Amino acid sequence: MNTKTLLLVVPVSWAGLWTGPLAEIALELNVRVHGRDEFAPEDVDYVLTLRPPAGFLKTLPNLKAVFSLGAGVDGVLADPEYPKQVPLVRFVDRTLSSELAQYCVLHVLMHHRQQRFFDRAQAERKWRQALPMRRTEDTLIGILGFGKIGALTAERLRDLDFQVAGWSRTRKRVTGVESFAGESELPAFLARSDFLICLLPLTNDTRGILNAEVFRQLPEGAYVINVARGGHLVEDDLIAALDSGHLSGATLDVFATEPLPETSPLWTHPKITVTPHIAAISAPRVAAQYVVDGIARFERGERLQNIVDLTRGY
Amino acid sequence: MNTKTLLLVVPVSWAGLWTGPLAEIALELNVRVHGRDEFAPEDVDYVLTLRPPAGFLKTLPNLKAVFSLGAGVDGVLADPEYPKQVPLVRFVDRTLSSELAQYCVLHVLMHHRQQRFFDRAQAERKWRQALPMRRTEDTLIGILGFGKIGALTAERLRDLDFQVAGWSRTRKRVTGVESFAGESELPAFLARSDFLICLLPLTNDTRGILNAEVFRQLPEGAYVINVARGGHLVEDDLIAALDSGHLSGATLDVFATEPLPETSPLWTHPKITVTPHIAAISAPRVAAQYVVDGIARFERGERLQNIVDLTRGY
């Protein structure tokens, strides 16, 4: 069989994360690293990347498919010259989805169970039991973006007896979870959501969706969790909604600029929890397996799974 | 029908929590509060309590049943003169169980996902992504006490892809959760448990079970969560196991003395999270319904549910 060439288009200092596992599980694959190894553009069959340099992919005349290293492909599609005839594959992995769901469960429970309050009480060595708590059964969670990851997150929160709803472009069916669909149902969805979790893909339609207008429609005291992309959030609108007291807090894992600059007011806002884009880390071993499986599938002439609809952008 | 008398044996300042809901849902019940209202001992049909004064219950000649306000009945059975012919009912409630499960999920995830590390990084405005994380699939959780609450907790953690096992006196069957039974299987159970969650009833057999000998058998870096009773834990042994580095941390919701004295070293230990016995708060409305339902059942001549086996102590 003809040896196929996979080109990694990632920061060179990170490449070792994937070249190691790839070498272990795919002996027959010729793995090259962009910016480190020599390669002839016409030899490149496949690319694994998160954010390729604009205009680069179109220079590979025999490119058969592009594999994204993340569930979100906005980094790849940021290239205005993306070669539209080449299928782009999203990394949809049970582990990645499960980690995102865990992250959401953790941050919902931290706020719901007032763990920050108890942390402060501990720091003061004070036994402060007296805070009333809302029951999970009376707490409504809204998940913006109700695909596979949203559905898994919804199920885990539903199992903890929260009342969960999802919002997406088209209606979905998840047992025990309400489904809202389309622009017209967004206001009703927001009006009921004590927690708003953003798991949307970043597209022209969703950029800046977490804004003052949306926050205003949430109930008093709502909590916002953004685990999708920094581009979804209008940071100043969030800070204003927190400072006015309308929102009770927020957890942010993603930011317009990453790493988040030391000067950002998000770091020090008393109602914001910042984590450094760690909600889901694609294990390199799992990612390597996904690209190897995808290549094998393509070479056998089978249809690739999780191909991105380039007009939708996800 | 003869009006029945229910006596609340709780601190007088708390009694209003239950007398309100009881008055709403049980108009025909004569509710009296010990230490506040007059009552004739021979008129008392039922008692609702958590920790009655020793020797008090035996002074009620016509007592038909005692309802515990908590899932644990060690406070009632601390009375050496408990009238053994009177059935004692545990408060086993889906909400209470669910809240305990939520608490365990929260504290497992906080440690598993290193939220304290990220909190410190945020306080320093540092983007610190670089910490490796164990996968949930590779993380083993052991639940000491595998009754209804233990099973629910196990299921919720199992659904987050942790590997969960339970340990109890007799073998149990919960899908996808390993069951260890009896003294002879305790070492194997401990040796596999990266997290040890104590949900045991407090009896003569389980008092002080969280001790140096048990901690020694846990894997290096294990984390301990005690959400049962302070009497299960030998505090000095925990501190020694944390200080030696063998255990990585602990979350404690219950203490030998409550409120936890301001001088306790547990408050300030850097590896210990202290919460003030809030893992599960029996909602007074739910507790009132449980005792009203139990009385109705007894008066209809039906068998009470969740009667404590006085020789086992739970």
Image (cartoon, coloured by chain):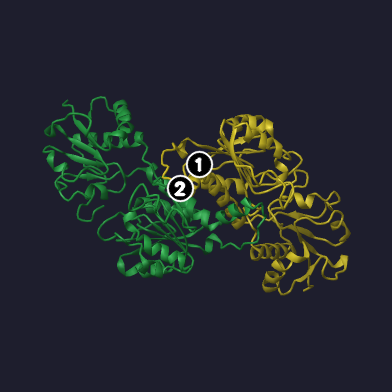
Chain colours: A green, B yellow
Vertically, is B248 above or below B43? above
**Callout 1–callout 2 Cβ contact below 8 Å:** yes
Which of the chains bears the disc numbered 1? B
Question: Label 2 is placed on what type of residue?
Answer: Gln
Q: Which residue is more in the foreground, A218 or B24? A: A218
Q: Which residue carries the number 1 mark?
A: B112
| Residue A160 appearing in the image | no
Q: Which residue carries the number 2 mark?
A: A102
Q: For marks 1 and 2, give the one nearer the viewer.
A: 1
| Residue B18 appearing in the image | yes
Q: Position of residue A77 (x, y in %)?
A: 22, 49
Q: Residues within 10 Å of mark 2 (few under 14, many from 20)?
A: many
Q: Position of residue A26 (x, y in %)?
A: 27, 28
Q: Position of residue A68 (x, y in %)?
A: 27, 43
Vertically, is A93 above or below A183? above
Q: Give me the C-alpha separation between circle 1 and circle 2.
A: 10 Å
Q: Position of residue B216 (x, y in %)?
A: 64, 30
Residue at x 18%, y 37% (from the top left corner): A301
Using residue B115 as the reference point, say whether residue A209 is left or right of it: left
Secondary structure under tag 1 reads: helix
Q: Which mark is residue A305?
A: none
Quadrant hosting residue A42: top left
Residue at x 55%, y 43% (from the top left corner): B174
Question: Label 1 is placed on what type of residue?
Answer: His
